[in-house]
Amino acid sequence: MRSRGDNWENEPGFDPLTGKFKHIDLDRWLKEKKVVEQARNDGKQNKPSTDESFDGIPAKIVAWVNNRGRICRQNVSTRLDDLERQLADIENPQELEISRHEAEETAGAASAALEGEVNKGRNILSDQQEYVREEDKDFQAFRRESGLRRLPDDSGRKWFWRYVLGFFFFELVINATTLMDANPFGLLGAMVQMGMICAVNILIMGWIMGGVVRGAHYIGVFRKAIFSLLAVAIFVAVVCFNLVVGHFRDSMQAIINMPAEAAVAADLNAVGSDTFDRFLEGWIMFDSFQSALLALMGFLFFCVASWKWFDRDDRYPGYGRRHRQRENRKQDYLRKYGKAERNLEEKFRFFEDRLKDIREKLRLKQSRYREILSQGERIIADYPTNLGQYQHDLNRLLGAYYSANRRERTEPEPPWFSEQKEVDKEILSAPEFNVPEQESIKDVADTVDRAIKVLQEEFRKSRRRFPTLEQAMNRLDSPSGSADERALAGPAEALV
């Protein structure tokens, strides 16, 4: 059996790296150290003798167990010291003071940034607020002067262009096919001619007629009379125009029916002169049904186009336009209100995230603190059980030696074979684990939490400093405002 000094090989009972206690396999240890074999050899020689003091292999076993216990206790103490240093590092006053200062500085900068963003937004909204009020004032004055108590109706605007363009192309195709056989250039020439005729009927005269009919709804008698007369004049002009178009087809047809030499000699002036002669001789007397149909279709499409041009806006002149202008002002205000809110929220989120980052670092410190503290407390809690095992190990090792020695002896054993040997008391008492108070990190964490709550409350108050659409209108909830006026304003988009 080899020894190192007075003690056997070091068998550590605690691993400082993992923080776990280690138990030795006593049977394997007895076999590798040949304790039983040595005990038998000593027994055959009746060693130790009855008058010998406690020494030899038993003394080495006691020394080894005690030394192993002291090494274990020292390793535990080293581990606990390391944990204490880690806890102290987490509770480092300088680092915590830096975190506190950073949180306070961030909170101050956030407050100034929010105040600046509120002032910027209010300045932008101030101009828009005046625009909304002026537009609403003009609109309400217009309603009173015009005696209007109803809501404007501009629902026809949604599908207006689809109808008008549909009418245009429908008339173009129908009438072009009607005129095709009377045009020397065939379908292409007919479509060019009918394109100009459709433009006059639908896009020009229809637009004029729609506006004139709307003008006939003025409340003033004089204006109403003027626009009514204009409507009659336009109606007569369109009727005449389409009758001339029908006679024009007859003139073209006549040219087509001429002999080739005469048709070539005919010129544009001759066609125009013949058209007007036909119109003056009999303005509804057409040579063919197709010509009459051409005039009738042009007039009918003019009528439906005039109706759609009239229907594209409220029947009272300017009412729908003023209403849309007011609504556009309100929408502009809401858009700028929303943009001001988003800018304010972006500022708030930026500083809130910075404070939350600081809080998260402190939370990780607190979590690490609790983890390390738990490790130390677990080691202290496990120490009595694990170090108490050393007495059991000592009894087991000495018992193995004594039993093997007795079986081989022929003389009485020493009296100390029956004595109870105990491990050193000092190794059974756990090292101290001095835990630093966690007040500093908790105090800083509380400071950051308060800063976040203050910032959130300041953000909510800042949002309420933007005047809403109701406040911008400054009349929607007024008792003097009529039900129609409140309905016209529509929902004010509760943005607060």
Image: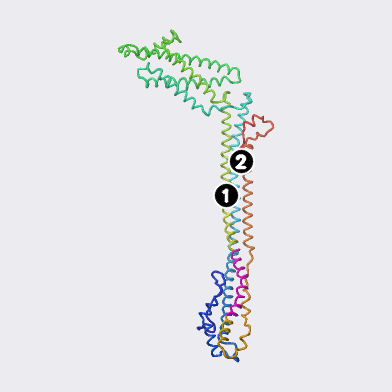
- Image coords of residue 161 (percent x, y): 49, 27
Please tell me which residue lies in front, 427 or 303: 427
Mark 1 or 2 closer to N-term?
A: 1
Quadrant holding the C terminus: top right
Please tell me which residue lies in front, 156 or 50: 50
- Image coords of residue 16 (percent x, y): 55, 71
Q: Secondary structure at mark 1?
A: helix
- In the picture of the structure, the residue carrying the numbered disc 2 is 495
In this view, the residue farthest toward the right is 479
Is 390 part of what is drawn in magenta? yes
Which disc, if any, is residue 349?
1
- Which residue type does callout 1 highlight? Arg
Q: Quadrant of residue 465?
A: top right
Residue range in magenta is: 370-396
Q: Main secondary structure of the magenta part?
A: helix
Which disc, if any, is residue 260?
none
**Vertical comparison of 180 with 456: above or below:** above
Say how the picture is coloured.
Answer: rainbow
In this view, the residue farthest toward the bottom is 51
Please tell me which residue lies in front, 472 or 456: 456
Q: Residue at x 49, y 18 (%)?
A: 300
- Image coords of residue 255 (percent x, y): 35, 13
Q: Secondary structure at mark 2?
A: loop
Q: Is residue 483 left or right of residue 78?
A: right
- Which residue type does callout 2 highlight? Leu
Q: Quadrant of residue 481?
A: top right
**Vertical comparison of 13 with 222: above or below:** below
- Image coords of residue 117 (percent x, y): 58, 46
Is 270 part of what is drawn in magenta? no
